[in-house]
Amino acid sequence: MQAFFSHAMKAALLLSAIFSANAHADDVLYREFGEKPGLAKIVDDLYDNVLADPRTQPYFEDAPIKRIKQKLVEQFCVLLDGPCEYTGRTMKRTHEGQNIDRAAFNALVEDLQKAMDKNGVPFHSQNKLLAKLAPMYRDVQDRE
């Protein structure tokens, strides 16, 4: 009987270690972005960049700055496997009628890259986020 409990204890410890390692590995990207405080700083810098960029600034005139920042932090957190929930509207609905073309989308990506660089996000981590954002262009672009 003692041997059974010994094996069961070893198995339980092994499973616990495996699950802990997987949980730890799953949020590596989120941690590389500085978790929620880091994402908030990146989004603040992104917003500064888009407002200073003549290619993107017109899209943000009269925009609800606080809400946009909050939803971007949520969205990035979810995309980076952080412990968040995105509570915003769909990308398609959010961007309807804004006449966003590929050039404006690419300019925003450049502004995001500058913000990530400024905050020391590793290049490979930046690429992972950008790869998750790239398909969203289909929902953001204005189709006529």
Image (spheres, grey):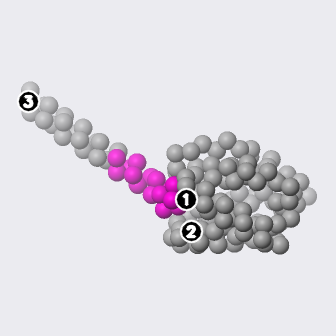
Side (left or right) of 127 relative to 56: left
Q: Residue at x 15, y 37 (%)?
A: 7
Q: Which mark is residue 2?
A: 3
Q: Residue at x 55, y 52 (%)?
A: 36
Query: From which residue to which does the magenta span run?
Result: 20-35
| Helix, strand or loop at mark 1 | helix
Q: Which quadrant holds the N terminus?
A: top left
Q: Which mark is residue 38?
A: 1
Q: Residue at x 52, y 45 (%)?
A: 83
Q: Nearer the viewer, mark 2 or mark 3?
A: 2
Q: Which mark is residue 50?
A: none
Measured Cα–Cα span from mark 1 to mark 2: 8 Å
In primary-sequence order, the first of circles 2 and 3 is 3
> Whole-percent x and y of residue 75?
64, 51
| Helix, strand or loop at mark 2 | loop
* Quadrant of res 109: bottom right
* Nearest the eye: 132 or 29: 29
Query: Badge 3: how crowded within 10 Å, few (<14), some, or many (20+)?
Result: few
| Amino acid tagged 3 | Gln
In primary-sequence order, the first of circles 1 and 2 is 1
